[in-house]
Image (cartoon, grey):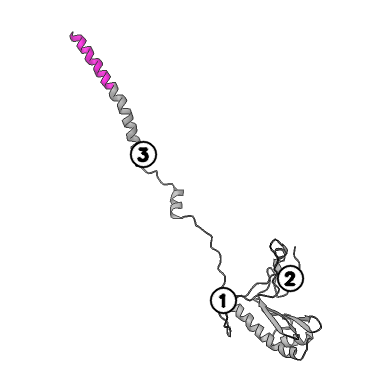
C-alpha cells in the first residue's frame, strides 16, 4: 500500500511538472512579444539623414529682375519689348522654331537706359519727319550726331515715304529700333536676341 502511494505521488508530481512546462511556453512567448513592442529599432544612418533633411516640396526658380520707375515715367514699370515679337496660334510650331528671333525684354536700369535712348532718338528724327526727309543717309547722320558710333547705326529705306533704323546703344546690349514715316516716328528698346551678339535680327532657324 505504501509503495502504491509512493508511485501515485510520483505520477502526480510528473503530471504537474509537465503542465507547468506547457503553460510556461506561451507565457515566455508573450513576454518576448511584449518586450519587442516596447523596443525601438536602432535608427540607420539613412533614416537619420532623412529625418534631419526633409524632402523639399518644390524647386526654387530664379525670380524675375525687379523694375523701378525711370526718370519722367509715371505709369507702372513694364519690361520693354521690341515690335518684332513672334506670335503664333496654339499648335503652330512657327513661334517655337523661330524663338531665336524673339528679342529679350529690358529690366531695371537697362530698361531706363533704353527708354532714355528712345526719347533722344525720336526727338532727333522729328525735324526730318516734319520736312519730309526720309533718306536713310539723313537718318543715319542724325543718329550718329547723337554720339552713337557709325558702325552701331543702321538705316534703310522703308517705302517711298519711310525709313527704318536700328541703333546699338551700348554693349549690354541695349538696342533701339524703329521707323519714321509722314505720320509718326516710333522707336522701341530691347535687349538683343538669344544666342546672338549685337542688335540685328539673327538669320537661320529650323
Q: Work out which residue is located at the far right of the displayed protein and give it.
A: 160
Mark 2 closeness class: few <14, some 14–19, many ≥20 residues within 10 Å: some
Mark 1 closeness class: few <14, some 14–19, many ≥20 residues within 10 Å: some
Instruction: Give the residues drawn in magenta, as a range.
Output: 1-17
Confirm whether the magenta stretch covers residue 113: no
Label 1 SS: loop
Residue for badge 2: 202
Judged by its main secondary structure, the magenta piece is helix
Label 3 SS: helix
Residue for badge 1: 67
Q: Position of residue 19 (x, y in %)?
A: 29, 23
Q: Position of residue 108 (x, y in %)?
A: 58, 77
* Residue 145 visible in image: no
* Residue 11 visible in image: yes
Name which residue lies at 66% across and 86% down. Answer: 120
Name which residue lies at 32% across and 31% down. Answer: 28
Amino acid at each position: 500500500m505504501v509503495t502504491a502511494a509512493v508511485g501515485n505521488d510520483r505520477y502526480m508530481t510528473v503530471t504537474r511538472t509537465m503542465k507547468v512546462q506547457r503553460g510556461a511556453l506561451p507565457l515566455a512567448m508573450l513576454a518576448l512579444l511584449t518586450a519587442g513592442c516596447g523596443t525601438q529599432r536602432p535608427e540607420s544612418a539613412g533614416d537619420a539623414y532623412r529625418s534631419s533633411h526633409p524632402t523639399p516640396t518644390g524647386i526654387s526658380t530664379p525670380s524675375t529682375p525687379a523694375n523701378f520707375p525711370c526718370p519722367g515715367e509715371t505709369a507702372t514699370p513694364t519690361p520693354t519689348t521690341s515690335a518684332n515679337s513672334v506670335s503664333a496660334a496654339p499648335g503652330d510650331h512657327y513661334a517655337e522654331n523661330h524663338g531665336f528671333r524673339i528679342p529679350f525684354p529690358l529690366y531695371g536700369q537697362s530698361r531706363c537706359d533704353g527708354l532714355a535712348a528712345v526719347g533722344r532718338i525720336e526727338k532727333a528724327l522729328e525735324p526730318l519727319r516734319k520736312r519730309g526727309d526720309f533718306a536713310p543717309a539723313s537718318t543715319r547722320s542724325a543718329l550718329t550726331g547723337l554720339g552713337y558710333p557709325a558702325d552701331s547705326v543702321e538705316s534703310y529705306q522703308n517705302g517711298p515715304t519711310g525709313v527704318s533704323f536700328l541703333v546699338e546703344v551700348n554693349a549690354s546690349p541695349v538696342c533701339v529700333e524703329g521707323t519714321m514715316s509722314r505720320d509718326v516716328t516710333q522707336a522701341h528698346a530691347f535687349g538683343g536676341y538669344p544666342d546672338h551678339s549685337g542688335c540685328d535680327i539673327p538669320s537661320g532657324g529650323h
